[in-house]
Image (tube, rainbow, N blue to C red):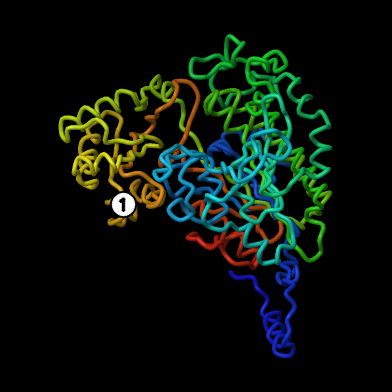
């Protein structure tokens, strides 16, 4: 359902024919798509399983998640269509409309086989930290395709603003794209403020300095975390004191209440704020400050874009697990934050003048130790034992224990120099490793890079692995664990697999141009970006492989 207005196109053709010298000024989205939104708000909730929406629904208020579901459009079978399901990869795929195969972000961190070192997705030594002594030497340059936000900036000839906001640097930087006006993230430790990179600017805007100097972070850090409601009403999760949750330093059990003022010294000071619901609240506060400070959504002819990522849900999930009272309270509090944010948008931008989408960058596995207690198949991989057994095999088969250069993110990188010295073929060794490790406990699938380059998997988990494989950056052998088998601590949840507990997330659309409704058909996460591009009448991001979700639009 393309939304360009034909009379405008005809008028443009006549005008161009009559005037040899055409102005370089862009045609605005507001002029091109009549009645379109003045502001698009993309919301990513880090580590949100789809069933959080249904499990906690009866406890949500009317203005947050329920407002999106009941007055917007819900995709009930939205899935990640690749492996690995990590934060940086998810945010990038949402905004580029494609998978790691194309956009190049294959993890939060990954082994760079050219530089021979482990790298972080947004680290960039060419830039300086702005707003703090360190923590800001970042950029989106490892993302090799454009985003929907980039395309909006280019369509409007750099008019209209794009801002990214999050606790995590990668979650602010990658969604905002290459051409953003700013991306801001929270610097913890002893700082407790939002910072940025010289990639975007040389100094923080005054509104950011005012926010940082407001004392808000300190106020939240000094406020105890107790349940929003009577803990006895929290029946959607397991008992508060259980052996499947992590414990903050300085506290004997993973139980409410949490005296943050007392715990902060032993838990990274302002870093502690990231790991409690108040971390989401301060991101909401900062997003509101950005709307006011940058005057987002105030133009009558331009469209602005605000990319907001709530990361504290991920920290809480990793610490306490998906069945904890802590995760239940975190979502009830996030629901309240969202309700306040939407009311703010109504007042500052105007009802019907903005469009929102909400999704997640991945979901999460239930704690395997908890699943084992229920006799559900699950478990943990011993990485040290895995590496020892594999090196023993390589030594007995090829006469060397030094053929593997790196093992990370369920990938093996072979040492090409050692292979050449031993006169060994990389494909022969890779296939031998696959044939060996498939016999190891906890390994479900193993496949070589050569197979992923030559075969075409259209269904099943190997199809997801192929979408996540990047020939330039990925390893020589890829491994898939058994369901609910992870390499992680025995408390708390994690993610990264291609199983439904990691891939099934909410996608909600609401606001200008969006109709009320729902669909249960399969929708891959990469469909969000082309859908928003279609709504705005702009070009798709240049690596797009997703499709427009046509049924979300008002007829």
* Residue 278 drawn above or below residue 84: above
Does any portion of residue 62 appear in the rendered image?
A: no
Give the left or right position of residue 69, taking residue 205 as reference. Answer: left
> Percent position (x, y) of residue 538?
63, 67
> Percent position (x, y) of residue 66?
67, 43
Location of mark 1 (residue): 452
> As rendered, which of 21 and 275 lies closer to the eye?
21
Displayed quadrant of residue 165: top right
Give the left or right position of residue 117, taking residue 180 as reference. Answer: left
Give the left or right position of residue 83, taking residue 397 as reference. Answer: right
> As rendered, which of 107 and 316 lies closer to the eye?
107
Few, some or many C-alpha atoms within 10 Å of disc 1 (few <14, some 14-19, many ≥20)? many
Q: Quadrant of the C terminus?
A: bottom right
Q: Quadrant of the N terminus?
A: bottom right
What number of labels is visible? 1
* Residue 311 drawn above or below residue 474: above
* Residue 294 drawn above or below residue 193: below
Q: Secondary structure at mark 1?
A: helix
């Amino acid at each position: 359902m393309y939304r360009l207005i034909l009379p405008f196109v005809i008028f443009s053709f006549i005008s161009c024919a009559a005037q040899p010298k055409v102005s370089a000024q862009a045609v605005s989205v507001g002029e091109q798509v009549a009645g379109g939104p003045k502001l698009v708000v993309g919301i990513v909730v880090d580590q949100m399983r789809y069933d959080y929406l249904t499990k906690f629904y009866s406890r949500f208020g009317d203005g947050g998640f329920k407002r999106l579901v009941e007055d917007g459009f819900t995709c009930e079978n939205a899935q990640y269509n690749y492996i690995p399901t990590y934060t940086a990869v998810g945010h990038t795929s949402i905004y580029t409309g494609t998978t790691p195969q194309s956009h190049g972000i294959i993890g939060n961190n990954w082994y760079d086989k050219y530089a021979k070192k482990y790298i972080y997705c947004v680290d960039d030594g060419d830039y300086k930290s702005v707003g703090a002594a360190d923590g800001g030497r970042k950029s989106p340059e490892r993302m090799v395709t454009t985003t929907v936000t980039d395309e909006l900036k280019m369509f409007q000839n750099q008019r209209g603003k794009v801002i990214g906001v999050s606790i995590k640097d990668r979650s602010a930087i990658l969604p905002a794209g290459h051409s953003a006006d700013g991306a801001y993230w929270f610097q913890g430790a002893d700082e407790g403020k939002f910072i940025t990179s010289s990639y975007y600017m040389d100094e923080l805007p005054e509104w950011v300095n005012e926010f940082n100097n407001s004392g808000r972070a300190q106020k939240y850090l000094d406020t105890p975390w107790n349940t929003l409601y009577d803990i006895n009403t929290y029946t959607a999760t397991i008992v508060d004191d259980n052996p499947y949750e992590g414990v903050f330093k300085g506290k004997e059990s993973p139980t409410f209440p949490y005296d943050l003022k007392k715990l902060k010294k032993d838990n990274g000071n302002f870093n502690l704020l990231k790991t409690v619901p108040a971390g989401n609240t301060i991101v909401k506060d900062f997003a509101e400050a950005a709307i006011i400070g940058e005057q987002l959504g105030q133009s009558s002819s331009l469209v602005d874009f605000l990319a907001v990522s709530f990361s504290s849900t991920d920290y809480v999930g990793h610490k306490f697990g998906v069945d904890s009272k802590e995760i239940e309270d975190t979502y009830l509090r996030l629901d309240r934050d969202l309700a306040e944010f939407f009311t703010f948008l109504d007042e500052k931008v105007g009802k019907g003048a903005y469009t929102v989408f909400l999704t997640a960058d991945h979901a999460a596995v239930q704690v395997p130790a908890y699943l084992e207690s229920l006799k559900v198949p699950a478990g943990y991989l011993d990485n040290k034992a895995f590496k020892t057994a594999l090196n023993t095999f390589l030594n007995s088969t090829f006469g060397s224990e030094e053929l593997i250069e790196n093992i990370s993110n369920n990938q093996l990188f072979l040492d090409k120099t050692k292979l050449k010295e031993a006169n060994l073929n990389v494909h022969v060794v890779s296939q031998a490793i696959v044939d060996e490790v498939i016999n190891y406990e906890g390994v479900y699938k193993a496949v070589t890079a050569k197979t992923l380059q030559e075969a075409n998997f259209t269904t099943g988990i190997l199809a997801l692995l192929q979408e996540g494989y990047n020939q330039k950056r990925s390893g020589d052998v890829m491994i898939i664990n058994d369901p609910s088998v992870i390499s992680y601590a025995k408390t708390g949840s994690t993610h990264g697999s291609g199983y439904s507990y990691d891939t099934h997330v909410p996608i909600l659309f609401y606001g200008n141009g969006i109709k009320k409704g729902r669909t249960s058909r399969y929708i891959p996460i990469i469909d969000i970006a082309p859908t928003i591009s279609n709504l705005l009448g702009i070009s798709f991001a240049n690596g797009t492989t997703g499709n427009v979700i046509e049924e979300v639009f008002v007829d």
